[in-house]
Structures are given as C-alpha cells and as structure tokens.
Image (spheres, helix red, strand yellow):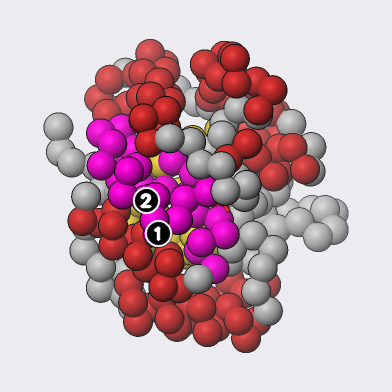
Amino acid sequence: MARRLPVVGGNWKMHTTRTEARVLVAALRAELGGLPGAQVVVFPPSPWLGDVADALAGSNIEVGAQDVHWEPKGAFTGAISAPMLAGVASWVIVGHSERRHVFGETAEETNAKLRAVVAAGLRPVLAVGERREESDRTADVLRRQLDDGFRGFHGLPPEVVIAYEPVWAIGTGLAASPEDAQARCALVRSMLAERFGAPAADGCRIQYGGSVNAANIEGYAKQPDIDGALVGGASLDAAAFAAICRAVAAA
Ligand code: PEP
C-alpha cells in the first residue's frame, strides 16, 4: 500500500482579527511554505478566507472553511454555501464537535453538509468523537457518527479525511494518549473497511485531534493509523504549528 500523506489542519475557530490573521498566515508561509512530507491546511474564520487564500497563493499550504450550509443558496441569513467557498477554499470541516454540541447540529445536517461539500468539489474533513459521558461506548458512538455522516454514500468520497477528536480532549489540555488515539483511529479505519472495503479504508487519512501541541505531537505522528492532526489552540501560534507540521512530516 502506498504511504498515506499525513495532513495537518489548523482550525483557528473564532480567533484572530484581520491583522492577526495576516500576520499569522505570513509567518506560516515563511515557516511551512515548502514543507515536504505533509499536507498543511489552515481553516481561518470565514471573513478572512480571501485574505488568507491570497496570502498563500503559490505556496503548498491549503485553505479550508470551518463549516458550511447544506443548501447551495437561499434565504439563510448568515450562512455560507459550498459553491460560495469553491474557489477560495479547497477543504471544509464538517461535523466539528462545536457545531454538533454547541450549535446543536444534527446527524442529518452533518450528512447534508458532507453531501454539499462533495457535490461542490471540495474536500471534507469529517470530525467524529465521543463525549466524556460516552467513553464507555466509544465504538457505538463512532459507528453511529460514521453511518450517519456517510448515509447515502456508496463509496468513500475521494480525499475525505476523518478527524477522530474525543470531545473531552478538545481545548482542555487533556489529550488522549497516543496509544488510545491509535486504537480509536484503527477502529475508525476498520469501520470504514466494513462499509466501503479495505482498499478505500487503507487509503483514507485519519487524523487525531484534541489538545495536540508541539510537545505531544511526536507520540501521535508515529502511530500507524494516525495520519496527521487537527489542531485548534496550538494552530494560532505560528512557531508551535510549524513545529507540529514538521514533526508530522518527519515521522
Ligand atoms: C479542534 O478544534 O478541533 C481541536 C482539536 O482543538 P484543540 O487543539 O484546541 O484541542
């Protein structure tokens, strides 16, 4: 099997002023613009997508959106559609735990967003993960989220990335151990294999996310079923994010 190219995403969430975004992206371009061995994607707040895309033009750092609406257009004040993103972003995070648990996104909505992203020719990062109170039934939660997310799909969408992110590890400093993260990512891969076949599952990149930083990334990067990371807080610090990307590329 060909080696999967690891992918590191930086989810800036609702952080950065326009000036801060410009400074951050310039630093990332200087640090990571020519990094071999890993794909790097930044997910800035939507008002800065154009600025960030312009600042990264001609570099190998890619741009993604943090969320999307499932309809292509319409009376949905405040929402952004996948066709609107096409041209400025090439990736979209779908089903992030903050969308699911803070904004109440339903399984049907996550599925509709995934369809919209694929239909627009964008690449999805589908985020899945259990809450603390679901830790005794993680496999059931992951299976349900994958089944619901891919409802109606007959094949794994090309270039889809799965982000395994235990909700209790996001933004808490309580990262999963590399061994536990590896076990969960392997479980996700086995579920993808059951549904879509082993070749598709073997080719699919699965990230770990949840309090990843420059000090702990190495433990995840060397795991066989972990193909990079989705990084929140540490992605706002150019030096830390660059160190994470380099560690992933070197693993
Ligand atoms: C995330 O937002 O997906 C995330 C993993 O955040 P953090 O790295 O801050 O835990």
Element at label 2: helix
Residue 151, quarter of the rendered image: top right
Residue 55 located within the stretch drawn in magenta: no
Give the distance between the C-alpha atoms of the residues marked 2 and 1, in whole angstroms.
6 Å
Q: Which mark is residue 147?
A: none
Q: Residue at x 27, y 29 (%)?
A: 202
Give the left or right position of residue 17, taking residue 65 as reference: right
Q: Residue at x 45, y 73 (%)?
A: 238
Which residues, given as a range, are shown in magenta? 208-236
The 10 Å Cα crowd at callout 1, few under 14, some 14 to 19, many 20 or more, is some
12 relative position to 122: left or right = right
Q: Position of residue 131 (x, y in %)?
A: 65, 29
Residue assigned mark 1: 214
Which amino acid, by three-letter code, is at mark 1?
Ala
Q: Residue at x 61, y 55 (%)?
A: 66
Q: In the displayed structure, would residue 11 be above or below residue 2?
A: below
Give the residue at x 79% y 37%.
104
Rendered image: mark on residue 217? 2
Against 156, residue 61 (above or below) is below
Residue 38 visible within the image:
no
Contact check, label 2 and label 1, Cβ < 8 Å: yes
Residue situated in front as seen by the camera: 231 or 196: 231
Depth check: give the residue in front, 178 or 242: 178
Q: Is residue 24 above or below residue 234?
A: below
Snapshot quadrant of residue 245:
bottom left
Which image quarter is the N terminus in? top left
Q: Secondary structure at mark 1?
A: loop
Which x, y percent locates residue 250?
A: 21, 56
Depth check: 89 or 101 in front?
A: 101
Q: Amino acid at mark 2?
A: Ile
- The percent coordinates of residue 231 (x first, y second) are 49, 54
Q: Could you say which quadrant of the image residue 28 lies in?
A: bottom left
